[in-house]
Each structure stands twice: as structure tokens, then as C-alpha cells.
Image: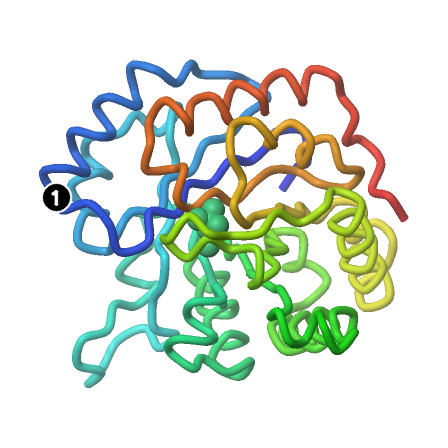
Amino acid sequence: MARDKTLIVGNWKMNLNMHEASLYVHQLAKLVKNRRDVEVVLAPTALTLQSLSLQVNYRQFKLAAQNFYWRDQGAYTGEISASQLRGVVQYALVGHSERRHVFHESDKDIRAKVQAAIRNQICPILCVGETASERADGETLDVIHDQLIGGLANVTSEEVEQIVIAYEPVWAISSGDGNGHNALPSDVKKVVAIIRNQIKHLYGSVAANNIRVLYGASVRADDAAAYLAIEGIDGLLVGGVSLDAYGFNEIVKKAHKGSSLAKNTEGGI
Ligand code: PGA
């Protein structure tokens, strides 16, 4: 997977019913221009994935699952597998903080999901990030370290470059209430360097330079460019604002301008 495109992922969380989702994509499709240097990924609810897969032009939008179960099939009432998502989505979020903290997903679950996604040719977006109390206790580095080790434990050096890492400080995520606190780009830069250093330690410099790293948490159109300009950042994971077609398109436009400056060719390690 190359780092030549800026990746903008919209995480709709548990919002929009089928009708609203279809209308929204229709509206977004009129706004978002196809750009060679930007890849736009939409992560709607599982319910709408199938119908949106028929509606979207894959050259304009790719689709992502917000969650799935790691086994391929069986007696797992209420679950959807990566093998069922195969061909419908190109990406899947794994270990989003709401999955970790609201639904108590463990690193063991997350590691199995990373494997299941890779096995089914879906690119996992592995989310990592510290909570407010972990940050206050100075544990950010340890948390990121443990989440990376936990999520990547069974990933080979051939597979690792298919993975996208998303750094999402939990204390900065708006969680739907619009009250996220913004992380400083200088702080994000330090964590991105930590992530790439750890990938280097585990898989070597080529993987560390090639793996894509996103930032996400309360990103808005007016600060998107500042986050995109951070050394080593390849794109953004956008929650709340991804439900506003105009705001989201503004972020996509910033990604195009940002890529054209070609500031992200070095990995920051
Ligand atoms: P937010 O969500 O942009 O609303 O903070 C980001 C996320 O949870 O992925």
C-alpha cells in the first residue's frame, strides 16, 4: 500500500438510517471531486453498507466497516464477519476507542480482527490512543506501545504494510457531543514518530516508512490542514464532521492541497 494518496476516512458511527445514508452519499458525490492524490473512505453503519456498495462509484468513495467479528462464520448471533464483508468494503476500523472502552474489546479481540481483515483482503485501520487519565499519568507512550504490540502480534512483515494505523487520543474525540478537546499538532507529531519508531523496531525501516498513519479526534475543516501538515501523517479519520457533507468535502479539499505540497514523503524517523 502506497503513501502517495492522502486517506480521508469518515466514521459515521451509529448515525443515519438507510434513507438518510443514501441521500447523504448522493449529496456528497456531487461535492467531492475525484483526485488522484486523495482516497475518500466512508464508514457507515453495517446496515447501510450493502446498499451503499451498489450506490457509490468506487473511484470516488471506498467503503469501510466500523466493526466485525473475527471468526468467518458460525453460531455467533448478532455478528457480521469479515468474510461476509469481503467485496463490500475495502477497509475496516479495528479497535476504535468506542469499541475498546464502551464494548470492552481486548487486545486479543483486536489482534484476531486484524488477522480476520487481512485474511479476507480488507485493509484494517487499527486505532490506538490514550485516555485522559492515561495522558495525565504520563502513560501515552506505554499505551501506544501496548496497543500496537497487542494489535499487531500475529502480523507478518509481508502483511504489515497493508495496515493503516490511526492515532486517536481518546480525550480529544468528540464522541458525538461536539466537546472534544483539540490535540496540538506538536503533540500528535511526537506520537506519530513513536508509532513509526515502534514499527521500525518490530518490522524494520522499510515497513516504518511505508505504513500509513492517520490522525483522528475532533478534526474540523479549519484545523484539518494543520493536522495533515504533520510530518509522517498520511490522512485523517473524521467522526462528527463526516456527517456534514460540506464540512467533510472541505476536509477532502484540504487533503488535495496538502498532498500537492508533497510534504509527507518522509516518514519522520
Ligand atoms: P470525532 O470522532 O471526529 O467526532 O472526534 C473521531 C473518531 O472517533 O473516529
Q: Secondary structure at mark 1?
A: helix
Looking at this rendering, what residue extends furthest in the right direction? 269
Locate the N terminus by quadrant: top right
**Which quadrant holds residue 159?**
bottom right
Determine whether, in the image, residue 53 is placed left or right of residue 251. left
Residue 81 percent location from the top left of the image: 30, 68
Q: Nearer the viewer, residue 6 or 21?
A: 21
Q: Amino acid at mark 1?
A: Met
Determine whether, in the image, residue 159 is placed left or right of residue 95. right
Label 1: how many Cα within 10 Å (few below 14, some 14–19, many 20+): some
Residue 242 percent location from the top left of the image: 38, 37
Whether 72 is drawn above or below 157: the answer is below
Whether 127 is drawn above or below 150: the answer is above
Q: Nearer the viewer, residue 57 or 29?
A: 29
Residue appearing at x 73%, y 30% in the figure: 229
Residue 193 percent location from the top left of the image: 83, 53
Task: Determine which residue is flagged by label 1.
Answer: 18
Residue appearing at x 60%, y 70% in the figure: 131
Residue appearing at x 51%, y 70% in the figure: 115
Q: Nearer the viewer, residue 113 or 142?
A: 142
**Which quadrant holds residue 140?**
bottom right
Residue 204 percent location from the top left of the image: 86, 59
Whether 26 is drawn above or below 140: the answer is above
